[in-house]
Amino acid sequence: LDLASRYPILRQYPNKSAVSAKSLLVASWQTIGLPKLLQIDNEATFCGGYRHKRVFSQIVRLCLTVGVEVMFIPFYSPQKNADIESFNSDWDLAFWQRERFRDLTHVQAECQIFERWYRTRHEPPALEGLTPTEARVNFTPRLLSTDFDLHQAEKRLPLTSGKVHFIRLVNSLGQINVLNESWIVDEKADELVGEYVWATVDTAEQTLMIWH
């Protein structure tokens, strides 16, 4: 979902694998454009799982490869992704609950109709009377090349230069969890317990910076 115009792209897959997620992202970037920042939650597919420290998922690696920064919202905080949750509610009421679907193919076919309606007929409150298509009239997106295929490679993508951001809640020990590792916020971390901080990993500089 492009937050500026509320312009969506919808795809349905039989699983939540990294392959499916990468396919969706590439389709999105080829259709509605490359963003500066991709905001996502902490789903294992997105973050790379919780077994190993300092792991960078295939999703993060793909984003950095095309120059997109990634931001993970706080753990267990869907309200921090309010725009997506609001869109999900619209999708649920105007699409998912209105028909009994036979199979994945049926869902995919019907969802194209919903996607077209949302883009061209629906007027999200944030757009003040405009449809998503109308909100993009004077916008020229930076599209990913249609022949891009690195996401289909069997080998793991290399870790390239870029930034990965994390919004994290400081716990009772004055720590935050970034890349499956606990980090002390600062020497006076006890003053920040219960506060949110913004942490940024710079893969080129190999640094972690934390702001309150």
Image (spheres, grey):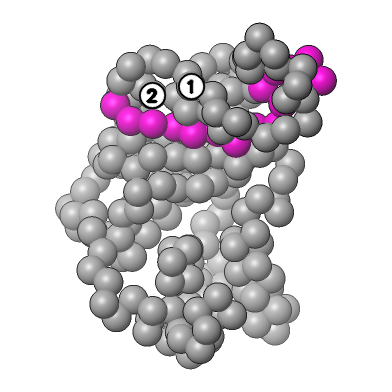
Residue stretch in magenta = 160-176
Question: Mark 2 falls on what kind of element?
Answer: strand
Q: Nearer the viewer, residue 83 or 148?
A: 83
Task: Please tell me how crowded label 2 is: few (under 14), some (14-19), or many (20+) other residues with Cα within 10 Å.
Answer: some
Nearer to me, 40 or 200: 200
Q: Position of residue 39 (x, y in %)?
A: 50, 48
On the image, numbered disc 1 is attached to which residue?
209
Q: Give the residue drawn at x 59%, y 80%.
A: 125
- Residue type at numbered disc 1: Met
CA separation in Å, label 2 and label 1: 8 Å
Q: Position of residue 151 (x, y in %)?
A: 32, 41
Q: Is residue 98 left or right of residue 167?
A: right
> In this rendering, is residue 179 above or below 34?
above
Amino acid type of the residue that numbered disc 2 sits on in the rendered structure: Asp
Above or below residue 194? Residue 150 is below
Please give the name of the residue rendered at 50% of the width and 79% of the height, measured from the top-left corner.
127
Residue 171 forms part of the magenta stretch = yes
Q: Nearer the viewer, residue 87 or 58?
A: 87
Query: Where residue 10 appears, x then y in whole percent?
Result: 48, 67
Q: Position of residue 15 (x, y in %)?
A: 57, 49
Name the residue rendered at 29%, 26% in the picture.
161
Please tell me which residue lies in front, 40 or 21.
Answer: 40
Q: Which label sits on residue 202?
A: 2
- Contact between labelled residues 1 and 2, with CB atoms less than 8 Å apart: yes
In which image quadrant can residue 27 be found? bottom left
Determine if residue 23 is in view.
no
- Identify the residue at horizontal 30%, vertical 60% (top origin): 33
User: Which of marks 1 and 2 precedes in the sequence?
Assistant: 2
Residue at the extreme right of the image, as rendered: 172
Q: Secondary structure at mark 1?
A: strand
Q: How many marks?
A: 2
